[in-house]
Image (tube, rainbow, N blue to C red):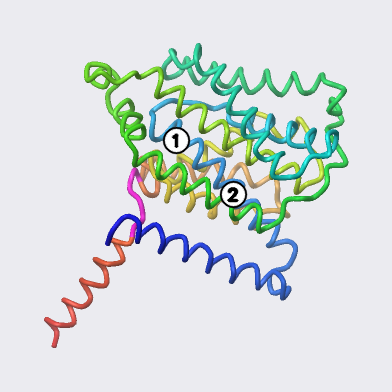
Amino acid sequence: MGKNKKELLSLVACIALYAVVQSLIMLDVIGPFWELNLILICINVILAVSLNLINGFTGQFSIGHAGFMAVGAYLGAVLTVKLQLPFIVAILGGAAAAGFLGFVIGLPTLRLDGDYLAIATLGLGEIIRITILNIPYVGGASGFMGIPRFSNFTWVFFATVFTVFFIRNFINSTHGRACISIRENQIAAEAMGIDTTKYKVMAFTIGAAFAGVAGTLFSHYFYIAHPASFTFMKSFDILTIVVLGGLGSISGSITAAILLTFVSAALASYPEWRMIIYSLMLIVLMLYRPQGLFGNKEISLKIFGRLMGGNKRGNTQGN
């Protein structure tokens, strides 16, 4: 099956999924509580897939993703509330601001590796949060309130589909292959003439931009952007999803985002148990499957084709 045909088939499947879920929402089969969780799943998928591009596919260790999400949330709110601009402009503005900040910060910090980069990105996330906390124009410690609810399932779903398609195509491009080669062996990649700093900054900028998109969608669904929503714990949640799904697997990030969001929803009445169960899941995972649920593998039509082909062969042999 050709690449274009696969892309078209995937797009048709996404539209069919959207039509089914949106119909169930309109018929009240899916109530407000589960609609909220579907929207959280989509936002978590955007955050996890974008962080996976940095951590999983390029081999960097960033734990400041919530900071870029905060930039998108606040700038998007300023564009719609203060400047009365359309929602699509807010999404693009949030993505551009977060991406630009990622580019500016990425240039000096991405020369670091491993633990040093993790500490630098952690500090960056906290600097962004503390800076927002001290800006009265966007509400300061009280948060930015009165944001109109422009986000709904339609906006969030198609933003998620766009994010997944964009990052998947980026990874399969020449630039994406260069990022993967850096993850595998940075010295060998440099020896082959790959500009490692350029590609690390590129992946960091793209990941930050999509975190900004998630932030704009988040603030325009919950009416408020508050500094407490973008702490280190939020970055930890996103990192947990990426590690649980598998570093270097988009399918894994999507599956883990769905799984952890449902676990969080099921434990809504027991918030004190949530982090304990998260921690236990990670411990069990590290013991029995340290590479994550999917490792660096992806779900593809080939798998279903093999399964169906295998069954047919099995039936033929049986007959």
Work out whether residue 262 or residue 182 is closer to the camera in this orientation and state it: 182
In the rendered structure, find residue 53 and report the number of the disc placed on it.
Answer: 1
Q: Position of residue 76 (x, y in %)?
A: 73, 36
* Residue drawn at the location 55% of the way across and 47% of the way down: 45
Q: CA distance from mark 1 to mark 2?
A: 17 Å
Magenta part mainly helix, strand or loop? loop
Work out whether residue 63 or residue 287 is closer to the camera in this orientation and state it: 63
Q: Position of residue 272 (x, y in %)?
A: 69, 44
Q: Position of residue 173 (x, y in %)?
A: 34, 38
In the rendered structure, find residue 254 and report the number of the disc placed on it.
Answer: none
**Side of 60 where 152 appears, left or right:** right
Which of discs 1 and 2 lies nearer the camera? The answer is 2
**Side of 11 where 195 appears, left or right:** left
- Quarter occupied by residue 303: bottom left
* Residue drawn at the location 48% of the way across and 18% of the way down: 117
Disc 2 residue crowd, few under 14, some 14–19, many 20+, Cα 10 Å: many
> Is residue 165 depicted above or below 32 in this figure?
above
* Residue drawn at the location 13% of the way across and 88% of the way down: 319
Is 297 inside the magenta-drawn segment?
Answer: yes
Disc 1 residue crowd, few under 14, some 14–19, many 20+, Cα 10 Å: many
In the rendered structure, find residue 159 and report the number of the disc placed on it.
Answer: 2
Quadrant of the drawing holding the N terminus: bottom left
- Determine the secondary structure under disc 2: helix
The amino acid marked with disc number 1 is: Leu
Residue span colored magenta: 295-300
* Residue drawn at the location 69% of the way across and 74% of the way down: 29
**Side of 166 where 21 appears, left or right:** right
The amino acid marked with disc number 2 is: Ala
- Quarter occupied by residue 87: top right
- Determine the secondary structure under disc 1: helix
Question: If you read the primary sequence from the N terminus, does the residue marked by circle 1 or circle 2 appear first?
Answer: 1
